[in-house]
Amino acid sequence: MHTQDMWIHGIGLTTPLGDRPAAVAAAVRAGLSRRSEGALLNERGDPMIVSQVPDDALPPIAAGLADRGATHIHLLRLATLAVQQAVAALPDPRELPLLLALPESHPKLPPFAPGALLADLRLQTGVPLSPTSSSLAYRGRAGAIAALVDAQLRLRDPASPCVLVGGLDSHLDPDLLAALDRDRRVTAPGVRDGFAPGEGAAFLLLSAHQVLPGSRARISVASPAIGHEPGHRHSGEPHRGDGLADALREALRGRPPATIRTVYAGLNGEHYGAREWGVAALRNDRAFADDLQIEHPADCLGDPGAAMAPTLLALVATALERVYCRGPALVWCASDGPMRGAVIVDDRPAPGTP
């Protein structure tokens, strides 16, 4: 019925609300928020509402990387603890494939090009990320769900025991904030349809074949699916919500009616995403339980861009373990570009889990 399941063996997070998954999940559950007025003003002279990771919460940059650009250094610092946390369950420092979602480029700005990011992540984190079997993709919020599709294919091979999937992004670059502000998308006084730009890093250590020493492997990830929206933000086509509806339909294929009990949604406060979710939910309404629980953590964390999907996965996995929510759960995200993604998460232990 479904393609091969994967199990989460490790979670790493860096968010404006902290870097311990259980503490971040509890803070989101309590409705705590780090959204606040930033130092930059918009074109109308009003402060932008942003959600930032405190600089003193980030580790220093490694020797040898201090000459990188400011944005590059910031992304490396955001990723450091999250990568190290996620791989803590690995029994030995073997080379590990990393499938990493990175920011989409804004159409009015130069393409995002982080240069030797993978090699620099190896040096900064001390984790032996594979230079030959890793991949970086600039796909925005839904990018890590596309990476899960790739991970599932790789993990069919018993010789590939683990894959690290993650997302890394910051909306807080001044040029990007200015471009978003010109589009009237940044929350501020007088902006009726905007979002709080955020940042963060989230990584998941996944396996399909074994239970690693020191990991519980009680949360499964299944049926990652991708859709494409012709009427995305940077397109002249009508926005009909087809891409997200298609992603949900594929992720839910073969499941009995009324079985999805929780949704962790990639909503960030903009009407565009809410309208798209409304279309997708209506077209797939048979899948949802009557007492469906819907969570949208961007209300607390801001919008972390390409880190959105793995952050939602980390939060729902923690919530399932601590019985904050009930499975099966659906996680979905929509990029500014055409990519849409959905995936199922459940509290189903891996075979052989003690």
Image (tube, rainbow, N blue to C red):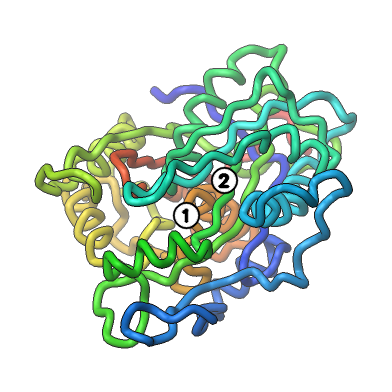
Q: Residues within 10 Å of mark 1 (few under 14, many from 20)?
A: many
The N terminus lies in quadrant: top left
**Could one spot residue 12 in this view of the protein?**
no
Please tell me which residue is depicted at 66% across the width and 56% down the height of the picture.
Answer: 70
Q: Secondary structure at mark 1?
A: helix
Q: Is residue 279 left or right of residue 312?
A: left
> Which is nearer the eye, 139 or 332?
139
Question: Looking at this rendering, what residue extends furthest in the left direction?
Answer: 238
Pointer 1 and pointer 2: residues touching (CB < 8 Å)?
yes
Residue 305 is tagged as: 1
Q: Is residue 80 left or right of residue 277?
A: right
Residue 320 image offset from top left, x and y in percent: 57, 56
> Which is nearer the eye, 322 or 272?
272
Residue 53 image offset from top left, x and y in percent: 64, 69
The C terminus lies in quadrant: top right
Amino acid type for the residue under numbered disc 1: Gly
Please tell me which residue is depicted at 82% across the width and 39% down the height of the picture.
Answer: 123
Q: Is residue 297 left or right of residue 287?
A: right
Residue 216 image offset from top left, x and y in percent: 75, 43
Q: Which residue is mark 2?
A: 167
Amino acid type for the residue under numbered disc 2: Gly
Q: Secondary structure at mark 2?
A: strand
Residue 170 is tagged as: none
> Which is nearer the eye, 26 or 243?
243
Q: Residues within 10 Å of mark 2 (few under 14, many from 20)?
A: many
Q: Where is residue 321, by image quadrant?
A: bottom right
Count numbered badges in the picture: 2
> Which is nearer the eye, 1 or 35?
35
